[in-house]
Image (cartoon, helix red, strand yellow):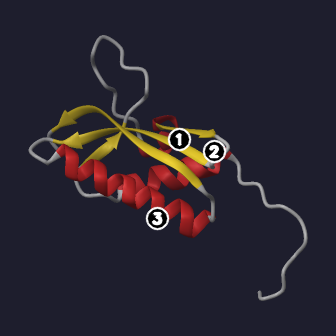
Amino acid sequence: MLDKIPGDLHIANDVLADIAGNAALECYGVVGMSSPAVTDGIAKLLPNSRLRRGVKVSQTEAGAHIDLYVIIEHGTNISAISQNLSDAVTFALTNYAGVALDGVEIHVQGVRVRD
């Protein structure tokens, strides 16, 4: 499709959350997504069907701002995993969805041994 179609394209925040969640799960060292609300100091691992709950998307003047809540694998470098997550989510959202990003923040909610 080389012809331009007049109008605006709006992508729902839930769709952006799904793209970001799937990109995050493909990163090395990520065990899964977690809910932003940690109860009693324990992070709960979300099933793959609820990835969206581990991602918060908000819109700012500069673009979409993404907050990822993840649980990482024991023995991995938190800094390296966070940078890889940020790069992977940025790549997925800018190339697949074509949205401008204000930033990606990684919140490590817990560390677990992979099953």
Residue type at mark 2 is Asp
User: Which mark, residue 14?
Assistant: 2
49 horizontally vs 41: left or right: right
For marks 1 and 3, give the CA distance.
18 Å
- In the rendered image, residue 46, in percent from the top left (x then y), is placed at 40, 35
Type of the residue with mark 1 = Arg
Name the residue: 54% across, 60% down. Answer: 93
Q: Mark 1 highlights which residue? A: 52
Q: Nearer the viewer, residue 54 or 78?
A: 78
Q: Residue furthest top?
A: 40
Dot 2 or dot 1: first in sequence order is: 2
Q: Which residue was labeled with disc 3?
A: 91
Relative to 101, say whether 13 is above or below: above
Q: Is 106 positioned to the left or the right of 14 in the image?
A: left
Left or right relative to 61: residue 102: left
- Which residue sits at x=67%, y=44%? 61
Mark 1 Cα shell of 10 Å, populated few (<14), some (14-19), many (≥20): many
Which element carries disc 3, helix, strand or loop?
Answer: helix
Kind of element beneath mark 2: helix
Quadrant in the picture for the C terminus: top left
- Going from N to C along the chain, the mark reached first, 1 or 3, is 1
